[in-house]
Image (spheres, coloured by chain):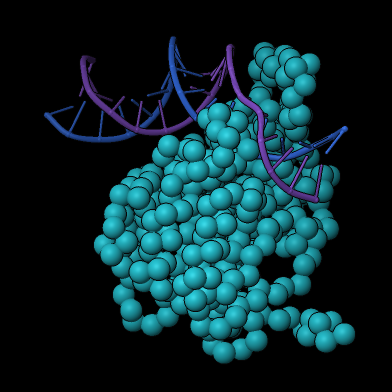
Chain colours: A cyan, B blue, C purple
Amino acid sequence: MIELEARYLAVSAKAHPEASTWNGSAGEWHPAELSTPRASVRLFAAGIPCTGASKAGLSKNGLSYAEEHPDVGYLFLPTIHYIRLHKPEIVVLENTDTYRGTLSARLLRDALTASGYTFDERVVNPLKEFATPSQRKRWILVASRVGRFSWIYEAKAFASTLADYLDPEGPEDDAESATPKQVAAADKYCARKKAEGAGFARTIVGPEDLSIGVVPKSYAKRQHTAVYVRTKKSYRMLRPREIARLHGFKRDLFAGLPKTTQYELYGQGVVAPPFICLGECIARFLNGELAGVPAGQLELFAG
DNA sequence: CCCAAAGTTATATAAGTCGC
DNA sequence: GCGACTTATATAACTTTGGG
């Protein structure tokens, strides 16, 4: 495991004590130093930092293209070097949806093809395809050099409300609710942004809503234009355990950690169901079965 | 055309933790 | 109980491209 932020790495290392960990940027090591044991099949998964490719990152850093980012723009290079040197059987690349159109993505595709891989690539929306209320879209590329892998699944849109995902009204609500002064400040800020023509605004959700916007990494900073939950008094922040549910996790993954860290981890992590599905499909593929074709799908394709 | 947020950075203040 | 340090809270100024 390689991770730049020591706090995040510590969480991961605790959950996976058997793993070797490297704290720093992937660009700091020669790919040969980062080898994985050749015991059996090797799967290489990389989430190259998206701060050069995301809309907010481009905007904030004044970049005209993702690769211009001074710290992370070049990280597709060590990724390619690693893949070409170690030739893992399966490669999974994950990123923000706009990464698909970057030069990095193009070069990664070319390098994979040149190294004997075929790949399946798509942008997944958990709300539309994995019956999960979050709209956190992800670009996912799965490459294989042991036969052509196709990630086939039955897309199922989220067809419920947030009622099962948000905590019911409770005694903590009042203390966590924004004060009238805070509400006024947020209103003022949002009104100003709207007047300036900004396309974003604060959203306040309740149990009746049919989806929820993205919870960003900086959620703990209490940005005025973020997602909040309606309360009797005003509105409050989402609690980490609620985000766990909204992201399709069965348990409160980071309970006990500082709240800020919990928000950061969920805010830059993935929504679980697509990746659980992908993992199962890859496992079936490697076991020699048809790549995760659910019942009924083969007939569809035959027609 | 409309929409979206792995937004960033800085400052101030208070509360809590920990070793000694 | 002090000081060093971490964490939480609050406020504010600044940021806009690409895709459906």
- Residue drawn at (38%, 62%) of the image: A81
Q: Quadrant of residue A223?
A: top right
- Residue drawn at (73%, 52%) of the image: A133
Q: Give the quadrant of the N terminus of chain A.
A: bottom left
- Residue drawn at (51%, 60%) of the image: A108
Residue A124 against residue A278 in the figure, above or below: above
Question: Is A214 placed left or right of A11 in the picture?
Answer: right
Question: Is A245 placed left or right of A88 in the picture?
Answer: right
* Whole-percent x, y for residue A290 in the image: 65, 86
Residue A292 against residue A227 in the figure, above or below: below
Q: Give the quadrant of the C terminus of chain A.
A: bottom right
Residue A119 against residue A242 in the figure, above or below: below
Q: Quadrant of residue A186?
A: top right
* Whole-percent x, y for residue A248 in the image: 64, 58
- Residue drawn at (49%, 47%) of the image: A49
Question: Is A76 placed left or right of A152 in the picture?
Answer: left
Query: How many numbered discs, if any?
Result: 0
Q: Quadrant of residue A239?
A: top right
Instruction: Note whether residue A170 is visible.
Output: yes
Q: Report the front residue among A42 and A235.
A: A42
Instruction: Note whether residue A239 is visible.
Output: no
